Image: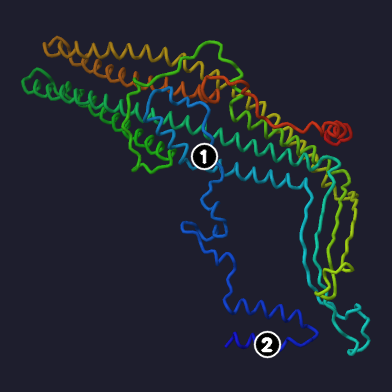
Amino acid sequence: MRMDYVLSSIHSLSRPTVLNHSCRALCILALCLLSGCTSPIKEKGDPANGPEYVSWLPAAYENEPAIALPKPKEHWWKDFGSEELNDVVETALKNNFDLRVAIARVAQTRAQAEIVKAALSPTVDVTGSYRNQGPAQGVGYAPTTDDWNSQPVWQAGLVVNYELDLWGKKGFNSQAAYSQALASEFNREAVALSLVSDVVTVYFQVMSLGERIVVGERNLETMRSVGRGLERRMDRGDATLIDVSQQLILQTNTDAQVSSLKLQKARAFNRLAVLIGLTPTTLKLRGMSVEDAKTPIVEPGLPSDLLCRRPDIRRAESALEAAQADLYAARANLLPTFGLSAQGGYGSFLLSTVTAPQSLFYNLSVNLMQNVFDGGRRKAEVGLASAKNIELLEAYANTVLAALRDVEDGLSGVALTERQYVALNLSRQRAQRLAELSAIVVERGGMDFVQLYQIQATVIAAEDAAINSRYEQIRASVDLYKAIGGGFKLGKDPCLGGGRLPAADAQWVKAAEKNDSALVKK
């Protein structure tokens, strides 16, 4: 019934009326709505494995990732000699959500840079319009209703708009956006480097805690055996209740220490699973001994150029360059702007003659605008950009200084933890030998129980300290890798890659600095 009514309405409007064309267009739109017309989006249908909000994407882009993570140039974590660790790191680089967020931000800043860069080009739009004007001659030209009639106007053509970048403002904006995109990419690299460092550190923390638990449980079983022997001696009268109680206290303290180690291992394991992007129940580790892990050999004369590879320094440098470009753009915004616009096409009162030669039209215009008063907003923008530039300059210097500190800490940590491990490992060997000798002496009754308790506590502490020292040595190596931005190999020029201001803008920069120096100081 609705279709018949709409069709009859359109047919009744086929004769000339004042609002003929407008009503006909509205009725055609109503016909589409009532008859269930579908747009090309609906005709295309939703993708098989995609949500509704991406149904308009072409098939070639439905499963296209935003930006993938470039593989690190140096797989420095492979220097530790663990295939399982290599697999864990590769999984983390694919699944970690913080890294995915950083990758998505790279895509955002790249797109933003393209948006800003597009402002350097003119805009060209195709226009088409229809309007119905009444009275035809204009307002006030129909003294009576008999003289009143409407006049349709059909028009189609091109519109071109372009703002001349005489002072380089758009160029500086484009450079700032490009530097921000670089900063986001270096931030992605910083997140990846920190992620790998955390994964390696936590992995070996889990392994070392597992070894410490094994050692603690072994010593605990030995203490229980000694305690049972003391109870038998007490029954025979060779030991007292005090001796047995002291042994039980040492045994329960060791049991509590092992429980604490198990708690630390569980938390470290759960953290490792989150870093990898998996749930703890799905993460399976075969494990390796921290004694079997390799540590890097650092030779004297580590080149300082390795610091150029640190992504946090490169990120701070790019952010500083973006702030500098923003300052130049704010200065350029104080100067007048020139705009060009052009429009051309065909226009006619009759659709049949819209493409006739006499229907051709065009217009050109040049606009000049200079701000006279805005309440000091533009000058304040210059001051804001200048202050931000100073802030990021100080932040850059602080980042470089912190990087130098990290390298010194890493070098000291590698050297001193190695010496510490050698000493504690020797102490562990002596403690193990002492435990073997003391067991023989105890069996023969040649040692008092107080000395036995002290030896047992010394053995436990020595073995636990040696394993923990080995973990600290590995962690110091990871910290050094992180401090120098990766492995020890130095490329041709690690300092390449930073964005620079266009050389073509150098003249204007000097003039702007000279003219606006007082304003910037203010």
For this rendering, which residue is in front, 4 or 299?
A: 4
11 displayed left or right of 41: right
Image depth: mark 1 or mark 2 in front: 2
Q: Which numbered marker is on residue 483? A: none
Residue depicted at 78% across the width and 45% down the height: 120
Looking at the picture, how far across and down is residue 58, in whole percent? 57, 56
Judge whether 257 appears above or below 281 on screen. above
Label 2, secondary structure: give it.
Answer: helix
Q: Which mark is residue 99?
A: 1
Real-space CA distance between mark 1 and mark 2, rounded to the nearest whole angstrom: 61 Å
Of residue 344 and residue 142, the one placed in the foreground of this image is 344
Q: Quadrant of residue 5?
A: bottom right
User: Which residue is painted at 31% across and 29% down in the image?
Assistant: 210
- Count how many numbered circles sit on residues in the image: 2
Residue bearing the label numbered 2: 9
For marks 1 and 2, the one nearer the N-term is 2
Q: Amino acid at mark 1?
A: Leu
- Which of the 4 image quadrants contains residue 191? top right
Task: Tell me which residue sits at (71%, 78%) in the image.
Answer: 25
